[in-house]
Amino acid sequence: MLNHIAGSPAATIRLAITLALAIILPVAMACHIVHKPVEVEKLLTPLSEADTPQLIRVVNNLSSVRSIHGKVDIQFEDTSFATSGIAEKYRTADGSITLQRPAKVYLVVQGPLAIGDVAQMTSDGEHFRIAILRGDEKYHRFVRGTNNAVYPKLDADGTPAARPGKQGKPTSEAQAVSALSNLRPQHLTDALLIRPIDLRAPGVTYVQSEFFQSEKDPAKLESSKRVVRGYYFLEELQTAGDGNARLLRRFWFDRVKDIRLARLQTFDEKGVLVTDVTYGELRKFGAGGEALLPAQVSITRPQDHYKITITYQTPESVSLDHDYSPDVFVLENKGGLREVDLDSAKPPAPPKN
């Protein structure tokens, strides 16, 4: 029966028509399709390759400098309203910075037109001191505190900051004073004097991966054009005996053309991002160009609602690896400023239930 149907002339004709339509119709439809080019984000190339030991060497090369002293530009930015897409930058100020390992810093913020120092800050690695020297008399003060302590954010008058109300927007002078008072020295030293990677540290392990991120085209910042940049992640994990691990630091390495440390993120014990540091292009530092270091470093503290950008004015004139006396990093209240001791002002711990 099947052979009879297959051999029927009518069936053969129907089969031939069906096959012809199956071929002709798609071809005819394709002739009417409009081919429209679509612009996609371009992947920046060439991408460099590196393994984990190479990435560790990049970090430790940046960590080899023992001390730095130089003139800088300082830009503060209030990110309190970042969730609303708003950030407020303060005027860029001149200054100087002296850093010495493991965690010592002396920062001077200078005013315009040679009016003298606006503020000074020191830390010996354990305690910090901040002197507000210029501006309205009510803003002048000398703040003492402990590096690792947690304090409430201070208002410009040295008291704990209140919730936003209807008092109106504070003056730019008050905002700048508040930013300086709430800056902590270890935020600077941890970013500018990167802690080296120690493979012998107990319970610490490192994991490498790759990542691609859409970014504004660096060659066309004024346009909306975007590109894709390739990164390596190197994540520093603290392992525990119960099989769990905690993320301590995440290093971002830009892979375009070369391997460069571009970003460093640190996290607390709950995995919350506490510091986000971005590093600019490398420049030769020192009179002989003996060190390659980023000329610009931006430090964002999401939980503290501020960002500070440090830019070395002339990297070639920066002094490197000088041994500074410990008293350089202990600021004295020589002007008799009103003192604010953050440790004595800390409220007592709430009673345990």
Image: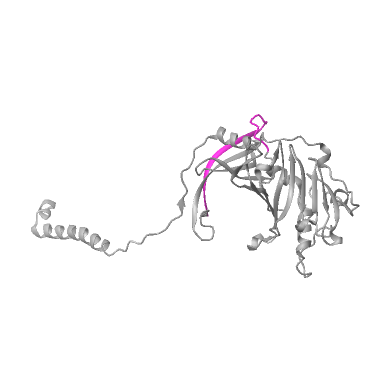
Identify the residue at the far top of this view.
200
Residue shown at the point (86%, 61%) measured from the top left: 138
Residue 90 % position (x, y)? 71, 59
Would residue 131 appear left or right of 61 to someone viewing this image?
Answer: right
Is residue 212 within the magenta segment?
A: yes
Q: How is the image coloured?
A: one colour
Residue 326 % position (x, y)? 82, 37
Residue shown at the point (76%, 48%) measured from the top left: 184
Q: Quadrant of residue 78?
A: bottom right
Residue 254 visible in rendering: yes
Q: Say which of 307 and 26 sits in front.
A: 307
Would residue 244 appear left or right of 147 to someone viewing this image?
Answer: left
Q: Quadrant of residue 165?
A: bottom right
28 above or below 51?
Answer: below
Residue 301 % position (x, y)? 69, 51
Residue shown at the point (52%, 43%) measured from the top left: 255
Is residue 111 within the magenta segment?
A: no
What are the residue bounds of the magenta stretch?
A: 195-215
Residue 346 visible in rendering: no
Identify the residue at the far right of this view.
336
Would residue 109 appear left or right of 220 to someone viewing this image?
Answer: right
Residue 329 % position (x, y)? 81, 41
Q: Quadrant of residue 133?
A: bottom right
Q: Say which of 243 and 156 sits in front.
A: 156
Q: Say which of 18 and 35 sits in front.
A: 35
